[in-house]
Image (spheres, rainbow, N blue to C red):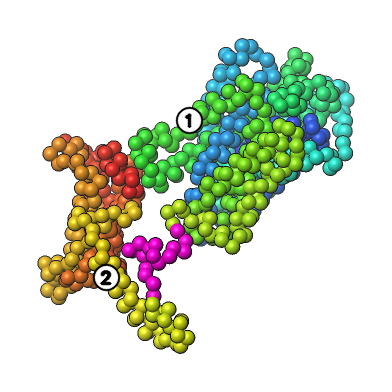
Amino acid sequence: MSKSEVKLYRWFNTLLWGNTVALSWTWGLGLFFSIQFTTQFGLPGLLSFAIPNGLGLIAFGFITHHLARREAGGSESLGKFFTAWSRPFRLILFLYQLLAITLTIFALIRYGWMPLGFQPEILFLPLILLVILAAGILFGEEFNIRRIKWSHGVIFLILAVAMGFLITAPWLFTKQAPTLAVSKPPVGDWNFWGYFIPIIIGFLLGPWFDLQQWQRAIQMHRERVSVAAAYIAGGVQFFLLVVFHGLLAVWVLGLSGTQLLRSGLGGHIYGHDAVMRFLFEKAAEHPWIFGAYCVFLCGCILTTLDSGYIALRWFLQSNVRTSVNAIFALIPTGLVTSPIPLFLVCGAIALIAAAVGLELEYFMIFYATFFVGYSALGIARCYINTPANCIPQIKMFCIGSLAVVIFAFGYLLTYPIFMIIGSLLPLGYVLWMLAKPTFSEDFVSGTEELGASADDMSPMAAPTMPAAQSAESSGGPVPLRTTLVETAAAIGDAAKSLVGAVQHPLGGHFEDKWFVHSFVATYADTNSVGNVYFGMYAMWVGKTRELFFNRVMPKFNLKNTTFYILTRSFEHKFVRETREFETVSVRIRIANYNRKFVTLEHEIYDAQQLLLGKGRQSLLFVSSGDYKMIDAPEEVLMAFLPYA
């Protein structure tokens, strides 16, 4: 293949990825709220909705492109970055995706199906829901992230044909070219700003918690496709799709006026389904136009649902592989990693919401408020290193919930200023949290304490250093070697006094998640040279492991047990030696576990709390009857759970 052919293929591949970016982002919110905002504020409203949407996609592409090049790891650099970056946001990413799927299903039922008026709804609504779910699951199972660009390429060709039919509608309906009335920008209307500011904030930050976009960016980088170029193409295509749909609404409203608008909950006027209702009324005269619009809606919705299915499956599988939560070991892997149960839950919520007459704005409110703070914090964490890999979950949840309530009051009572405050509040709080002098304290887990006093330190914590303090108080210089020697001696004396002062049970004790067994090495543990024989360290770890098992599973009995615990692998790194009559402490804890294996981590210290060695071991489980390998028994998981 020549260089020109390679270059042409890369550009074609980039456009394919840009197409699937645009179609995956043309979900229920982008598809139908473009009509609603157009009915309220005309063409300026349509553009003020579409432009931030497109720019949000492009900005996401540029930043992830930069991150992929900044991080080490070659084609996997962006994937590795996402794994580390997403760890504290896993629940929010999960909720964001579920809400997006729910909203998309709801929008198609509420504004694509219910205007057709088929009765009884109690029969037809569940049937159409099953059709939507089946289509999304089928395409999600058929195409993975590597092949989805091809399926979406074919779907776009179908959409292009449908859009071609729809473009001819004005000439077929009115026998003349359509006129486009351009209204004055509503800059003096507070209702406009009450929507516009949340739209800017929500959609500029929106892609950051969309799993579909992260999965696409990671796969693009693996295929050596420019993420920035693909998202520029995707952002422009999405903008054109939304503008096309909005212009349909402008044309329809120009013919029907306000006849197709309706009053909903809270007394607000809604027109999300204006185009569908108008074309359905004319379906007998122009069935091809009505059919083309149905194809357009279904194609846009399908490319969001199959993308959501694939992204959820990817997210669930990656979390199950790395999680140590016992629930993933007790439930079959196929069930835990399948998006089908989640799709059913989303479908049920969407069906109920449509049946009771809710509107799109009731779902949209969360993207303009609750997720804003998390998105801003997520972008900041791409460039700001925090002391721990966690976020202040309680604070973020409270500020997000408060923002939702404030925005809801503003929307229901028609106070635009409250809507603006509700959107700005999470963003302002994150900026304050990152700028305040004590911001690092917000990123430390609940089990960690910053600046603990010496009196509050545990026996394993480092004691004070009197040598350094005395040098500082005297004001005279102290040789570095002298300071280090005195400091080491002080640490050793403090450690010995701590060990001597605390009496622990002979069978070991727990220090947080660590099980600790302390003893004195004797002549029997040494070799001919006088230091401890290397094999004794493994013996000590084995003994500590048995004591740990005895502590957490005191009722375990070899005579009637249905399973045995076997060692799958063992590794140990020797750091330094020790001799007879030294106090030794072996610490062991559960590092992680899954359905089949449990990994234990161990550390060995001397009386001065100097590390002698460390390592890991892997355990497996077999049936006591036939020695066949089995899943980790529930008895073991329940015993280990408090210490994992």
Q: Is residue 577 visible?
A: yes
> Residue 296: image x %, image y %?
68, 28
Name the amino acid, label 1: Ile
> Residue 533: image x %, image y %?
17, 68
| Residue found 15% across the figure and 36% down from its top | 560
* Viewer-nearest residue: 406 or 368: 406
Horizontal placement of 385 versus 53: left or right? left
Q: Is residue 387 above or below residue 195?
A: below
* Viewer-nearest residue: 148 or 367: 367
Which residues make up the magenta segment?
449-465
Main secondary-structure element of the magenta-colored stretch? loop
Which of the two labelled residues, at mark 2 and mark 1, occupies the earlier sequence position? 1
| Residue found 19% across the figure and 57% down from its top | 506
Name the amino acid, label 2: Lys
| Residue found 83% across the figure and 39% down from its top | 189
* Viewer-nearest residue: 180 or 210: 210
Horizontal placement of 433 versus 415: left or right? left
Q: Residue at label 1? A: 340
| Residue found 57% across the figure and 47% down from its top | 396
Q: Nearer the viewer, mark 2 or mark 1?
A: 2
Image disc number at residue 496: 2
Return the residue found at the far top. Answer: 120
> Residue 160: image x %, image y %?
70, 32
Whether the magenta-drawn stretch holds residue 580 is answered as no
Instruction: Give the secondary structure at mark 2.
Output: helix
Q: Is residue 216 visible?
A: no
* Viewer-nearest residue: 138 or 434: 434
